[in-house]
Image: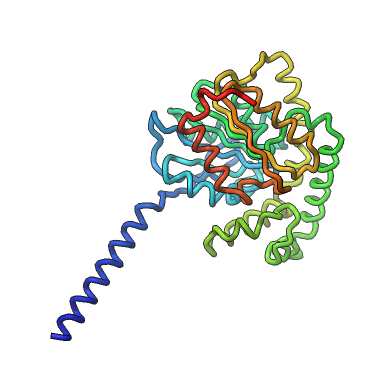
Amino acid sequence: MKRTLAVVAAASLAAAATAEAVATRRHVAAEATRYVDAGGYQVAVTVRGLRPTPETPAVVVVVGAGDVQASWTAVAHRLAADTQVVTYDRAGLGGSEAGPAPTADRYVAELQAVLDACLPEGRYVLVGHSLGGFIARLHAQQHSERLAGLVQVDATPDEVAEDRGVQIGFAVSGVLASVFKALAPLGLIRLLLALRAFPLYPEQRAFEARLSPDERRAWVDAVDRSMGPGGAAGPELRSVLPCAREAQQRIADVGRPQFGDLPLAVLSSHARGSERWVGMHRELAARSRAATHREFDDRFHNIHMAHPDAVVDAVDDVLRGRLLHQPAH
């Protein structure tokens, strides 16, 4: 009798474990990495989640200068539970091949190549961080037909070209990138990342808490490659100010609000050390009649790494159309 009860109990536990495993798998979004031709070179693209529906647009992430799509792992996993999420590495970053010198036109063309290959139809929301926010806005200005909304995560404003403080900040970042490039073969980048002391990622500890060991190793490899001798992190960081100047020229004759009723969510940090940076983001939010602006008190520029839940909430608001009747402020 006791043996029979033990067998029944073991079988019940096994069945429960199997059911839990199956239930867990249901919540894990499908994920596939592919390579897209961007005009003579291949860029690495990761597609997560289910196919988008007319009710729920896809989400496309455009990373910041010198950054990699692996930095968006935590946010992408969360968003992929509800819709399709596309992330990619620009030329010379992460898993992508080297490409032409970085320019505003190349950045926009590269994004368009990813969209043409992965989302040939249907609507999408662009989520742009730092330089990626600038790229997303240029795309919105040129290709608004299927665009369902914009999320700007501590995005680079056009006005930075005139701000001396921000100019100095980008200059320092460019110098650091050059130093890391020279010392990467000696293992400096991996050492600093292991010590969680890499200056361009002060949010690393909070970010890593949400990663599996394999995801962390993939992120470290991508950062090391991007910052190393064959990577494009340095050139990208040095391209920010010239691109901002070009953006100013392109929107000089554009009417206001620039984006009309397009849903727009803006997130700001104090990483650049001045109220003017946040003020530029307030002006950015005013470019749409359906906008919201959230400000963080800390100095974490990589908001998606320090506050992934807030980024997910902002994207979800745009996806669900919650900003459609809110005035810009």
- Residue 311's place in the image compared with 2, above or below, is above
Residue at the bottom extreme, as displayed: 2
Q: Viewer-proximal residue, 252 or 121?
A: 252
Residue 127, given in percent of the width and then of the height, sits at 57, 36
Position of residue 63 in the picture relative to residue 4 (left or right) = right
Q: Quadrant of the C terminus?
A: top right
Q: Residue at x 66, y 15 (%)?
A: 256
The image quarter in which residue 259 lies: top right
- Residue 24's place in the image compared with 136, above or below, is below
Q: Quadrant of the N terminus?
A: bottom left
Residue at the left extreme, as displayed: 1
The image quarter in which residue 82 lies: top left
Residue 167, given in percent of the width and then of the height, sits at 83, 37
Q: How many numbered marks appear? A: 0
Residue 59, given in percent of the width and then of the height, sits at 50, 37
Position of residue 109 in the picture relative to residue 25 (left or right) = right
**Render colour scheme:** rainbow
Q: Residue at x 41, y 49 (%)?
A: 29
Residue 237, given in percent of the width and then of the height, sits at 75, 42
Q: Viewer-proximal residue, 60 or 290?
A: 290
Q: Residue at x 61, y 37 (%)?
A: 128
Position of residue 329 in the picture relative to residue 212 (left or right) = right
Q: Viewer-proximal residue, 192 or 92?
A: 192
